[in-house]
Image (cartoon, rainbow, N blue to C red):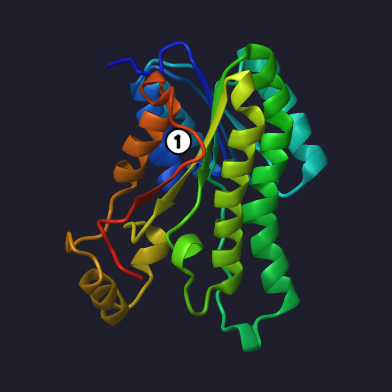
Amino acid sequence: MGLLTGKTALITGAARGIGKAIALKFAEEGANIAFTDLVIDENGEATRQEIEAKGVKCQAYASNAADFAQTAEVVKKVHEDFGSIDVLVNNAGITKDGLMIRMTEQQWDAVIGVNLKSAFNFIHACTPIMMRQRGGSIINMASVVGVHGNAGQSNYAASKAGMIALAKSVAQEMGSRGVRANAIAPGFIETAMTAALSEEVRKEWMKAIPLRRGGKPEDIADVATFLASDLASYVTGQVIQVDGGMNM
């Protein structure tokens, strides 16, 4: 359909999983893709080649998204390489679960740093470019646990709630410059992370989902494509739950 033809999308943490699905979908819609991951190994290079096979320009960048100065350098390089940054997807994220009473400071700091501070880092670096372009779409990959909370994931839930509030605040600040900001809150998505859960835990999750199935990374990618495209030109400051109707 070419919904994103002529646009450049920068996606963090996109060598695998949901980030990769978003990158592939964007490429199918005509966007040139710049993506980051902590290291660009064989897996990252394979992803780059897969995206490039869609007939678009693609480049992978090794980046510690939680590092402010490093992020600024990566964004500068992406802008030099592609000429524009029209879409930013803050997808980089980790989990270090544990009950609050047992959670260490290191667990808290690591998750807040990678999940929330990285979003700040990339938004801070990209918004001046988008403001000069008089347009852009920022998409923060949050989570349903950022909306409802979840026992044993206070650090993760706090980081994802922060990403929702960050998107809403940026939407208010940047709307007059034509820059939109939204958040997607995925529910139970079938990825390598959820595949590691026990069958018993998976069954309990499914009971809470009216559609009685886990989501696919492509389900998230479809919503991200809408938010990145001009179809969503009047959508900003929103959080869209993509969760099969689950009740937390």
Q: Is residue 83 above or below residue 180?
A: above
Residue 59: quarter of image: top right
Taking 101 as reference, is 212 left or right? left
| Residue at the (73%, 72%) spot, across then down | 106
Using the image as rendered, state which of residue 195 and residue 153 is in the foreground: 153
Look at the numbered disc 1 and give the secondary structure of its residue.
helix
Q: Is residue 149 above or below residue 84?
A: below
Residue 12: quarter of image: top right
- Residue 174: give x, y in percent of width and height: 64, 28
Residue 65 can be seen, yes or no: no
Q: Is residue 4 above or below residue 239?
A: above
- Residue 81: give x, y in percent of width and height: 65, 16
Q: Amino acid at mark 1?
A: Thr
The residue identified by callout 1 is: 47
Using the image as rendered, state which of residue 87 and residue 32 is in the foreground: 87
Residue 192 can be seen, yes or no: yes
| Residue at the (69%, 64%) spot, across then down | 110
Total marks in image: 1
Quarter of the image that includes the N terminus: top left
Using the image as rendered, state which of residue 123 and residue 17 is in the foreground: 123
- Residue 30: give x, y in percent of width and height: 39, 17
| Residue at the (82%, 39%) spot, across then down | 69
- Residue 151: give x, y in percent of width and height: 49, 79
Q: Is residue 43 above or below residue 95?
A: above
Quarter of the image that includes the C terminus: bottom left
| Residue at the (30%, 68%) spot, across then down | 247
Residue 243: quarter of image: bottom left
